[in-house]
Image: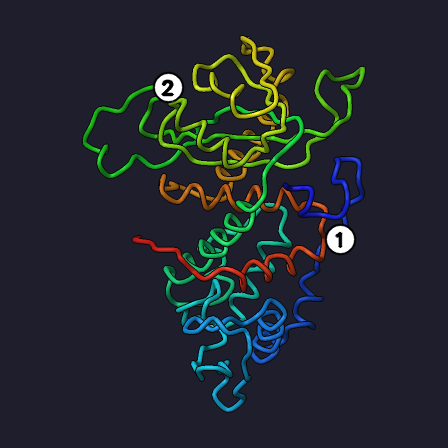
Amino acid sequence: MYRSLVQCDINFGQTKEEEMKLIDFISKFPDEESCRTKLREYRERHGVVCPRCGSILHYWKRDKECFECKSCHYRQSLKANTVMHGSQLPVRYWFIAMHLLTSTKKSISASELQRQLGHRNYNPIWAMLHKLRVAMGTRDSRYEVSGMVEVDEGFFSTEVPEGDKDKPLKRGKGSQKKTKVLVMAQTGAGMPTKKSDKPTSVKYIKMIVINDLKSETVDGKVRLNVDPSSVIISDDSKSYTNFCKLVKEHIHQVIRPKEVGKVLPWVHIAISNAKRLLLNIYHDIRPEYLQNYLNEFCWKFNRRFFGKALFDRLMVAAVAYKNQFRYNI
């Protein structure tokens, strides 16, 4: 569950730690060698596993700058079997990208990062950011939301899919320019205050792109992401009719548009904030990549009080998961 992710409660009233400043990052990682040395430390701390025989015992070949298995003598590079697997970009590029992703309140676009790095090609920089976002999502997928959980769907603006560009454009929620997202928010135990009818805190959120709103589709996502002992609060949508079979209790009711902010406050705050962030930074998001952007939003929100430790947590995710991202732009 998400409570194993942190060692402290992260209600909104908690003091946020200071993020790593740019000048601190530059002094800590002044060149490529310092970044490669730190990456090696993270890999050895996490454990270098031989992909051939599965052994965790290895040597560091200084002359070749690679790990060699003590059992079968298989060699793997410093970047191998991490999020940097197969990348030709310098390790320092990856460190700079991770610093900017974790130190900025919002995010950074690939075009802006390309400009800051002075790199000639756009595609490798774009792919690097998406690989990191995939690692964020993979890390968050290990945890479930629990306790009191608000559930609702959101509709995010994206590009019209290639197969639908020749078709007449629909209106409303069924438009080809809208991608469906299931949103879950784990609220705190605080009771509503006199000034507000909503719970006083939100702990963690999850946002998952879904193809449709059929009950079997939604049930599958809830089964994977919500602890069975939880209490789900939702509207009276037909998509949620089976929730009572998946969790301890399902509280549902018909909600008028004006009352959504009172009954499901945090899930709609999360949707609103995510939409605003995406609109302000990115343009023409393709539906197949929307999940990656939502991964970053949720990952940063769920660790919003980590401060300087946020860079470390992203490094842990970067060395723990081999790059599986495939793209076509």
The residue located at (63%, 47%) in the rendering is: 105
Rendering coords of residue 79 (x, y %)? 48, 72
Residue to which mark 2 is pinned: 172
Q: Compared with residue 208, is residue 24 higher up or lower down, i.e. above or below?
A: below
Q: For label 1, count other residues whose C-alpha is less than 10 Å away and answer few (under 14), some (14-19) or many (20+).
A: few
Q: Compared with residue 285, is residue 230 higher up or lower down, i.e. above or below?
A: above
In the drawing, what numbered circle is on residue 92? none
In the drawing, what numbered circle is on residue 18? 1
Q: Compared with residue 258, is residue 76 higher up or lower down, i.e. above or below?
A: below
Circle 1: residue type: Glu
In the image, farthest residue toward the left: 166
The residue located at (59%, 74%) in the rendering is: 35
Determine whether, in the image, residue 148 is placed left or right of residue 57.
right
Q: Quadrant of the N terminus?
A: top right
Here the colouring is rainbow
Rendering coords of residue 15 (x, y %)? 80, 43
Q: Earlier in the sequence, mark 1 or mark 2?
A: 1
| SS at circle 2 | helix
Circle 2: residue type: Gly
The foreground one among 197 and 101 is 197
